[in-house]
Image (tube, rainbow, N blue to C red):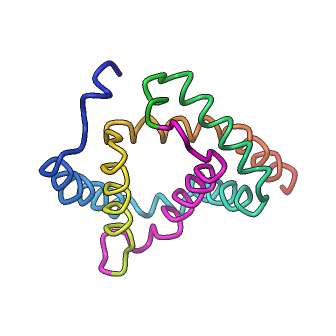
Amino acid sequence: MEDLGKAKDEGAYATFVSNHVARFVAKLLKETREEFHGPAFAALFRVTRGLRDAGEEAWALIGETFYQMAFTTYPDLVQYFPHTDMDALALHIINAIEMLIETANTIGTRESPWHDKVNNLNRIHKIHEIPTNTYQLIGGIYLKVLRPFFKQEAEKWKNSQ
């Protein structure tokens, strides 16, 4: 984490990430897309959809918990969020995961919105000088935040059997 602030997106680096890393991830996801239809991803989809439909109170909870955990675990991230609407970011995170799951069947195809979405994300992060080496940190924290909701989903499934 000590190098976090040093890894700024510069022109060639941003192009490399967008052209090579994004394509590699899309190819990898395409090769494993069958797994997106398994029980774990089905539960993730239901949890994400349920949170999205739950409204602003749930989004605020997700945003607050997510960023508290992120900033406590990785204090260097705070500098990238000086004046941020955390509720809007919480909805953004939920929408991103939902898009991932809903578009799993088209990853790596011409119909996939992935390339444009990744390029747009890369552009926004470049504007705000957010280093791309923070992406994997965010995913792990998101799953930790959702842990209680997965327990609720598991209880619903158990009670329906």
Q: Assess whether residue 95 is covered by the magenta stretch.
A: yes
Q: Position of residue 29 (x, y in %)?
A: 36, 58
**Of 139 and 154, which appears nearest the observer?**
139
Which residue is situated farthest in the bottom direction here? Answer: 111
**Of 155 and 85, which appears nearest the observer?**
85
Which residue is situated farthest in the top direction here? Answer: 2
Residue 132 against residue 111 in the figure, above or below: above
Quadrant location, the C terminus:
bottom right
Q: At 56% from the left edge and 22% from the top edge, which residue is drawn?
A: 72
Q: Is residue 146 left or right of residue 161?
A: left
Q: At 80% from the left edge and 50% from the top edge, which residue is drawn?
A: 57
Q: Position of residue 149 (x, y in %)?
A: 73, 44
Q: Name the quadrant containing residue 68.
A: top right
Quadrant location, the N terminus:
top left
Which residue is situated farthest in the left direction here? Answer: 12
Q: Magenta stretch mostly in which secondary structure?
A: helix
**Of 69 and 145, which appears nearest the observer?**
69
Q: Name the quadrant containing residue 133.
A: top left
Q: Is residue 91 left or right of residue 127?
A: right
Q: Position of residue 112 (x, y in %)?
A: 37, 75
Q: At 68% from the left edge and 43% from the top edge, which residue is drawn?
A: 62
Residue 75 against residue 112 in the figure, above or below: above
What range of the chain is rendered magenta? 81-110
Residue 148 against residue 102 in the figure, above or below: above
Q: Assess whether residue 45 is covered by the magenta stretch.
A: no
Q: Name the quadrant containing residue 52.
A: bottom right
Q: Is residue 114 left or right of residue 88?
A: left
Q: Position of residue 84 (x, y in %)?
A: 56, 44
